[in-house]
Image: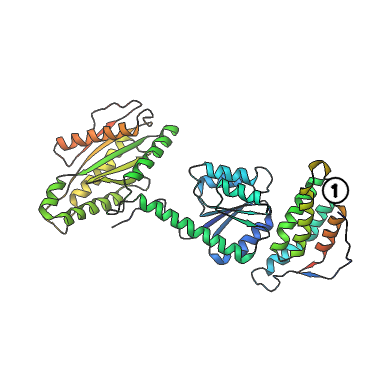
Amino acid sequence: MTTSVAQPESDVPSILVIDDSVDVHRLLTARLKSEGVQITCVKTGEEGLRLLRDNRPTLILLDLVIPGMDGFEILRRIKDDPKTMDIPVIVLSGLSSPQDKVTAFDLGAVDYICKPFDLTELRVRVRAAIRLSRLLTMLAQRAQIDGLTGLYNRAHFDARWREVVATASRKARPISLAVFDADHFKSINDTYGHPAGDAVLVGIGAALQKACRASDIPCRFGGEEFCLIMPDTTPEDALLVCDRIRLSMGEMVWSRHPERKVTVSIGIVGSHAAGAEASAAQWLEAADKNLYRAKQGGRNRCEMSVLEGTPRLAKAG
Amino acid sequence: MSRNPDGNCSPLYSTFKDDPDMTELVSTFVRELPERLATLQGSLDSGDLGSVMRQIHQIRGAGGGYGFDPISEAAGKIEDFVRSRPEADRSLASIRAEVDGLIDLCRRATS
């Protein structure tokens, strides 16, 4: 079984150093070499914030007194942006007054190291911050992952869907959503027992994970219902993707009941330029309606409709 | 603040001189030090307090990092002194002797 992992983080921790002093760049790079971390150094907050947009480091080491945007302002911006707010920041500063420390911690710094730094202290503090951050990431992932299938759960879907719709409508990009439901799932449970039913759910989760593209986000909604968020995908393309998944599921052979195939019905709704006015509930409602049509139409099929601006159902698929 | 000349010109060694991780960095620092001191001297001569303070701040941060703690301490004293004064009372004249002392101290750094 494949396990879906939220924002896979590579094994090598990466550290972004924001400090105007080249000496500090050199010293940190030499001093942290033995920690097996990858270090990137920049001289200004502007540069650092620009890098953060595309690369998410495990940890940030931040100087306070630097030309241009000062360290407190950089810290404030990192902690104000939902995308970067949970990256731990250690302040590394020549300022050592209690007031500076209090301000840094109030703004969200995880630790404060005074310059000139002691080598051993620096290493253990960096190590501790990375360990803490890993544990927090793991906890956050666990809370968003369905224990049976390893897919994202409903809580993750709710948060993620809002984010994906906002991005799509800001950039006027297409977006699609599909709801999957295993056909006659109750009868599988009743005939072969709950372990067989669970195996089917795990199998569907794995098939979904395997068949969807890297940018797609598969979730288990609950019960025998799954969904697939497809960013940057027109409803027509979503239909192609989902029909491929539907066909592959129909071909799967189940070790607990090789004689019995499992099919899925799929309701798809999509928009060519993000139905900005439609709420998450309206999207789900539209997808559910299509799922209902697929069930009514004889199951093991996809039904798709297009949502443009205000939700409007169109016959397709 | 008054100067306390010690007339000492014995070499100042890095406390990391036997640390293989640091040998190269320390010698780079020592090699580049005269250039820094020339820049600092230039800012002193042109009476640019802001520039002098920025460089002293950098020397403070760097010195100890390369194992030259006395350099960081001397630079730190100057920086803290200036910071403790009201903006209007800050002047190059009040720290001139200490900066000269810092430059002398840096010249003793040896790798």
Find residue A22 and report its horizontal and vertical position in percent. 68, 55
Residue at figure coordinates x 31%, y 38% from the top left: A177
Find residue A27 and report its horizontal and vertical position in percent. 65, 61
Which residue is at the front of the view, A157 or A292? A157
Find residue B31 and report its horizontal and vertical position in percent. 76, 63
Q: Disc 1: which chain?
A: B
Quadrant assignment for the N terminus of chain B: bottom right
Residue at figure coordinates x 73%, y 54% from the top left: B58
- Dot 1: within a 10 Å radius of its alpha carbon, few (fewer than 14), some, or many (20 or more) residues? some
Q: Is residue B87 above or below residue A290?
A: below
- Image-based side of A36 in relation to A284, left or right: right
Give the amino acid type for the residue marked by disc 1 in the picture.
Leu
Find residue B15 and report its horizontal and vertical position in percent. 71, 70
Which residue is at the front of the view, A77 or A211? A77
Residue at figure coordinates x 14%, y 47% from the top left: A186
Which residue is at the front of the view, A268 or B91? B91
Quadrant assignment for the C terminus of chain B: bottom right
- Image-based side of A269 in relation to A34, left or right: left
Query: Splitting the image into 4 quarters, where does residue B63 fall?
Result: bottom right
Residue at image mark 1: B92
Q: Can residue A46 be seen in this view?
A: no
Report helix, strand or loop for mark 1.
loop
Q: Is residue B15 above or below residue A245?
A: below
- Image-based side of B7 in relation to B60, left or right: right
